[in-house]
Image: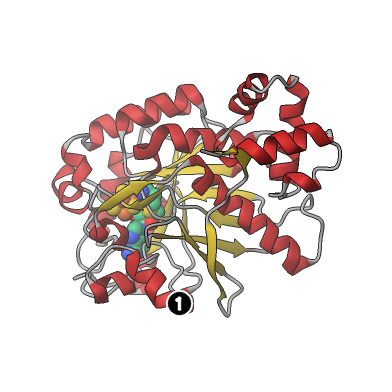
Amino acid sequence: MSINLLDFNAKALAGFCAGIGEKPFRAKQLLRWIHRSGEADFASMSDLAKGLREKLSAGAMIEPPRLVSDHTATDGTRKWLLSVGSGNGIETVFIPETSRGTLCISSQVGCALACTFCSTGRQGFNRNLTVAEIIGQLWWANKALAEEFGGALRSRAVTNVVMMGMGEPLANFENVVTALDLMLDDNAYGLSRRRVTVSTSGLVPAMDRLRERCPVALAVSLHAPNDALRDQLVPINRKYPIGELLAACQRYLQSAPRDFITFEYVMLDGINDTVAHARELVQLVQHTPCKFNLIPFNPFHNSGYRRSSSETVHRFRDVLVQAGLITTVRKTRGDDIDAACGQLAGKVHDKTRRTSRGILEAAR
Ligand code: SAH
Ligand code: SF4
């Protein structure tokens, strides 16, 4: 069976090269070809000896997920649907802004954590993505954006990566961390730890492991100011309640590239969005250096929730701001192509009552 070199970080690629009797610098060359130049064909890797190219072609491959569709929203947000086999699809979203371009990457097909307001959670869990499927999203985006902007791959449009697509990244720990290695590697994507963010619903032991292994910026999906409410919205809270979660945030901050944790808070009409909730939140996080990102709920079919009105969101924000907490309200982007938070792979599934298989069928 052919080995997919997109599954390897620098260390694994060096091991692979040693295994076929090649010097370590070959691994560096390969890494650059694959990730910096976006090259998938060994024959085009001009500075590799012909014998090596032939050896690689015989026993290895560079296989990203297959591109199924590519949509651009009226606000410039771009969404790619990639096939990961067996009828499964994943979505990757690029959000261009004036001074940066953020790519939102998926880590799993579906998600087992079943947050009640999340359409990925409603699908249930299908499987973890491989390293090639995770890093392949960045690989594709860089290629496609270089074409769009006519620039060399080196002057990248993707300046930031957020692991906020489908799935819980820390539930696919090893593959996500190996993909993070590549994002940070100067011979691959060369992003700084501050520009790569993992978002978690609060898997406490894995937060500690991430801190030791690869402390990138951290976002935590809080969504409620107390355990009773969070137990309902984010069921993993029953296992790792808020007290433990905040303690893990404190530990994380000792190694984090930024001196705050970002708390994400989805605004659900009449559920978690009152001034009383905001005040309770202020109390809750008083000893945790943090910023808040309020996310207006993105509705999907049969969700059972409504988005808070903008007045309610602003009132809520004002309470946090008056308490000295830096708070942003996430602008909803890519609405017209269903690319907003929590909408990925949403609609089709709800119509078909199947997993993300439906997306691919709909895309054909
Ligand atoms: N599993 C991780 C990362 C993926 S979700 C996590 O939960 O943090 C990325 C963010 O989108 C999370 O904060 C999540 O709670 C939020 N989200 C999920 N569904 C949403 C929806 N329908 N509307 C708005 N935000 C949503
Ligand atoms: Fe999974 Fe995150 Fe959705 Fe919760 S919000 S179900 S953890 S993807």
Total labels drawn? 1
Question: Residue 102: image x %, image y %?
Answer: 59, 56
The secondary structure type at the circle numbered 1 is loop
The amino acid pointed to by label 1 is: Arg
Going 58% across and 62% down the picture, which residue do you hit?
A: 94
Disc 1 residue crowd, few under 14, some 14–19, many 20+, Cα 10 Å? few
* Residue 148 relative to residue 108: left or right: right
Above or below for 98 versus 1: below
- On the question of residue 100 being in view, the answer is no
Find residue 160 and report its horizontal and vertical position in percent. Answer: 61, 49
Furthest residue toward left = 228
In the image, 339: left or right of 140?
A: left
The image quadrant that residue 219 belongs to is: top left
The residue shown at (38%, 60%) is 88
Give 27 or 265, whichever is nearer the viewer.
27
Rendering colour mode: secondary structure
Which corner quadrant of the image does residue 288 belong to?
top left
Most distant residue in the right direction: 47
**Residue 211 seen anywhere in this rendered image of the structure:** yes
In the figure, 341 relative to 129: above or below? below
What residue is shown with label 1? 364
Q: 302 or 172, which is in the foreground?
A: 172
Query: Which residue is painted at 46% across and 28% down in the image?
Result: 253
Residue behind label 1 places its C-beta within 8 angstroms of ligand 2? no
Residue 55 location (% of width, % of height): 71, 34
Q: Position of residue 325 (x, y in %)?
A: 44, 47
Answer with the quarter of the image where residue 76 lies.
Answer: bottom right
Above-or-below relation of 351 to 199: below
Quadrant housing the C terminus: bottom left
